[in-house]
Amino acid sequence: MFENVKVETYTLKAIEIISNYNNLFFTLDLGHNIRYGNIAKEMFLKYDDRIKHIHLHDFNGSKDHQELFTGILNIKEELDFCKSKNIDVLIEVKRKEELVNSVNKLHKFDYMI
């Protein structure tokens, strides 16, 4: 698995190289993606059949790995994207309380099945 963090020129090249191997896949971190200007998602979508996991956390403008629905990430849009591609989603926050709050909000807004 290859996960996006900050996207640099060499990262874009690595994505292209990895996409040529049938046994290598991508983890798209949507919180990192919004932090660094949506570059990774655009690049990964060229190989969307290779995205196998999503890391989901919010970004508040200065810090990522924030509780869902507390920052600028469009959670609904991203979850709709994940559902349309049938991609597993992992909530990636730092503290237990943030995870519980994130899951509760997902239930409240009917995103959990």
Image (cartoon, rainbow, N blue to C red):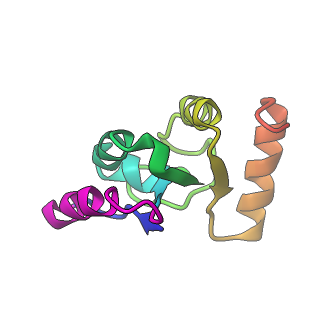
Q: Which residue is drawn at 38% across and 39% down?
A: 45
- Relative side of 109 to 68, left or right: right
> Magenta span has 83?
no
Quadrant position of residue 37: top left
Of 83 and 93, nearer the camera is: 83
Above or below, 90 against 83 in this view is: below
Q: Can residue 61 be seen?
A: yes
Q: What's drawn in magenta, residue-wise?
A: 8-24
Question: Viewed as shown, does residue 77 lie left or right of 62?
Answer: right
- Where residue 78 appears, x then y in whole percent? 54, 36
**Residue 15 falls left or right of residue 66:** left
Vertical order, 103 against 112 (above or below):
below
Residue furthest front in the image? 22
Q: Where is residue 96 in the image (x, y as percent from the top left)?
A: 76, 69
Name the residue: 62% across, 45% down.
Answer: 87
Q: Where is residue 30 in the image (x, y as percent from the top left)?
A: 47, 49
Q: Which residue is drawn at 60% across and 29% down?
A: 84
Residue at 36% x, 47% y is 44
87, 22: nearer the viewer: 22
**In the rendered image of this protein, does residue 10 appear above or below residue 80?**
below
The C terminus sits in image quarter: top right
Q: Can residue 37 be seen in this view?
A: no
Judge by depth and name the residue closer to the eye, 10 or 32.
10
